[in-house]
Image: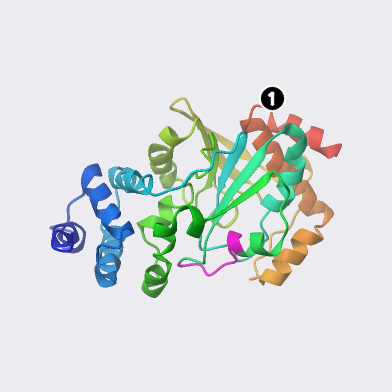
Amino acid sequence: MVNKFHKYIKAVGTGSKHNCDLSREEMCEMMTAVLKSELYSEQVSAFLLGWRVKPETVEEFIGAFDAFDKFIKKVPIENSIEIGYPYDGKVNNPYLFLLMAKYLKKYNLNIAVSGDELQPAKSGITVKEICENKNPEDNLFYFDRKDYFKELSSLTTIRNRLGLRTGINSIERLLNPTDSKIALLGVFHKPFVQKYVDIFSQRYKKLIIIKGNEGTPEIFSKCKYWICENNQISEHIIDPLDFGINYKKSWDKISLKQSLDTIANPSNELIKLVKLNVAMLLFVANKVQTIEDGYKALEMC
């Protein structure tokens, strides 16, 4: 594969006039070689950087997933919803999934999250750090990537030395080791919504994309969200103020200890915010007719 590498680096690394997109099959071959460590680290870095700058196509992302699927070890979890968090962490606000899990128990719903060592480029607090420092509810399933997809996890050193986002950042959040049928994914910019739908919608029965806090699918303030089901996309807006929630987001970087302390001792407004996010899950899992119905039911808890 080392000799074949030059074919692919030319495709992504020869400039705007000469770059060309890879086919799904070509991307699968290239990513398989990367995951099998058949290339020198310099070649992997060069390809990942060139692929990002080119930029990536949906067909290439799907080809990368074809390669991923050869290696991921799955442990199916019934009635699970996968929540895809960025691997570069959260900087300003705590994660909500630990608090969300306990409210989902009575509805027989499980949460699945994945984590790994910090990846470029935000330098936030990771899901892995949170889960290794807190005892989760028994309906919250944390999967460490080094256990179920060690081949991708082993690229951490190369990616951190590169220090920049690559195409892997865009697709690694929903690896679905639990074979979940429903997934939530965060998005920074609306133009990425259709791209994510094209990449992920065939991998789940229902995909929810939220323009949430710090690129996560967590609702902290007024935002848009999109539901994709049966090849149909619908756009919606949700505002915590409509539910009487006045949580004030932090704009300052918080430490791991501060994040854990906030989770251990949540304010009343943070609990309301947690319940709103839970109500979203109840709605997409067809446990309630509307998010409003779900929130009203949770207010009684």
| Residue at the farthest right position | 300
Q: Residues within 10 Å of mark 1 (few under 14, many from 20)?
A: few
- Above-or-below relation of 115 to 70: below
Q: Is residue 274 left or right of residue 162?
A: right
Please tell me whether the stretch drawn in magenta is mainly helix, strand or loop.
loop
Q: Nearer the viewer, residue 229 or 137?
A: 137
Residue 160 appears in which quarter of the rendering?
bottom left
Q: Depth check: give the residue in front, 142 or 280.
A: 142
Q: Position of residue 132 (x, y in %)?
A: 65, 63
Q: Foreground: 64 or 212?
A: 64
The location of residue 248, given as percent across then percent down, is 73, 58
**Helix or strand or loop: what does disc 1 sit on?**
loop
Residue range in magenta is 120-128
- Kindly indicate the quadrant of the structure image that contains residue 44: bottom left
Q: Count how many numbered circles sit on residues in the image.
A: 1
Task: Point out the image quarter for the N terminus.
Answer: bottom left
Snapshot colouring: rainbow
Measuring from the top left, give residue 13's x and y in whole percent: 20, 63
**Kind of residue indicated by mark 1:** Gln
Residue at horizontal 54%, vertical 37%?
180
Quadrant where the image shows the C terminus: top right
Q: Is residue 219 magenta?
A: no
Please indicate, yes or no, whether residue 36 appears anywhere in the rendered image: yes
Q: From this viewpoint, is residue 23 visible?
A: no
On screen, residue 99 versus residue 237, left or right, reads: right
Residue at mark 1:
289
Position of residue 229 relative to residue 95, above or below, is above
With 76 as the anchor, is 66 left or right in this view?
A: left
Residue at 42%, 53% (x, y): give it: 170
